[in-house]
Amino acid sequence: MVMFDLLLKNQLSAPKKVKFKDEILARVQGRKPEALNDEINFYKTELLPYFIKLSQQNPVFSVTEQLRLLVGVWTPIWSTISFHESLPQRIQEQSFQIFQHDGYCASVARYIMGKEPPLSQNFQSRLPAYDFMVIQKYEVQNGKWYLQNIDRFQAFKNQEIPLSLESVYNWFTNVINTKVKLNASKSLLPKAFNLENIEMNHANEFKKTSLATSQVFEHLYIDNDWRLVKTQTDASHLTSYTIFVKR
């Protein structure tokens, strides 16, 4: 009932906007990821009215002005991007999106190995975690944001040592400075990935998305600590929606 009361009003005051976002978070936080079609249905039946209202209340429409809010580290807390669930079980709180002032950004996440078939907890805890990072360049073209995938990196780690904000940032800056910029200066393309030992839920979707050259993304809503992002890799892909919170 609160949602529909708010939707009837043209403007949201600052306190009501906070309450509005909190109500969205209450619906998505702790939600176990479902099949993509189920998540899309959840968006259509549960979240769409919220998203429409927030897009009407976006405080910063100019993409150039959005840059000052975009730079930093974010966590995706809900999404209809199938790529997120292509690899084994993703740990949401150990998922990050980093934007730097220099036009480089990255999506990084930790995945737990041995999700299928079910393994004993003691045995599974000894398996390595799989950390995956997609490096991108971002820019403004004709008043719109564009992302371009430029490289991918992977690492197997001790899952008992969490993928922290500090370790992610150090990994990101290290590969940017020692590999990405060097490869760019030599016009080297990303090497083929060795994923033979990785459980894949949607192998074709993973390959198609991770190798995509460009992606349009739009902030339906952005403020200091909250982003609602609409993305589409190309005209043949479904439009996706993701909610990010600032770390």
Image (tube, rainbow, N blue to C red):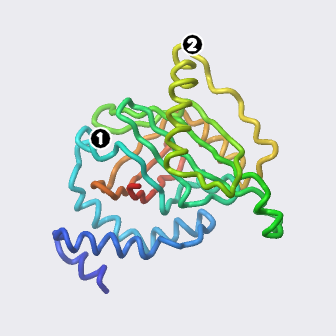
User: What is the distance, in whole Å, between disc 2 and disc 1 at their CAs?
Assistant: 29 Å
Q: Quadrant of the N terminus?
A: bottom left
- The numbered mark, 2 or 1, whose residue comes first in the sequence reads 1
Residue at image position (29%, 73%) is 20
Residue at image position (27%, 55%) is 223
Residue at image position (24%, 61%) is 56
Is 8 on the left or on the right of 127, as rendered?
left
Disc 1, SS: helix
Residue 72, placed above or below residue 36: above
Which amino acid type corresponds to the residue marked 1 in the rendered image? Answer: Leu
Between 181 and 144, the one lying in front of the other is: 181
Residue 145, placed above or below residue 36: above
Residue at image position (53%, 73%) is 30
Is 19 on the left or on the right of 216, as rendered?
left
Residue 97, placed above or below residue 32: above
- The circle drawn on residue 154 is none
Name the quadrant containing residue 89: bottom right
Q: Position of residue 71 (x, y in %)?
A: 35, 42
- The circle drawn on residue 186 is 2
Residues at discs 2 and 1 in contact (Cβ within 8 Å)? no
- Badge 2: residue crowd in 10 Å (few <14, some 14–19, many ≥20): few
Q: Position of residue 238 (x, y in %)?
A: 52, 52
Which amino acid type corresponds to the residue marked 2 in the rendered image? Answer: Lys
- The circle drawn on residue 67 is 1
Between 146 and 70, the one lying in front of the other is: 70
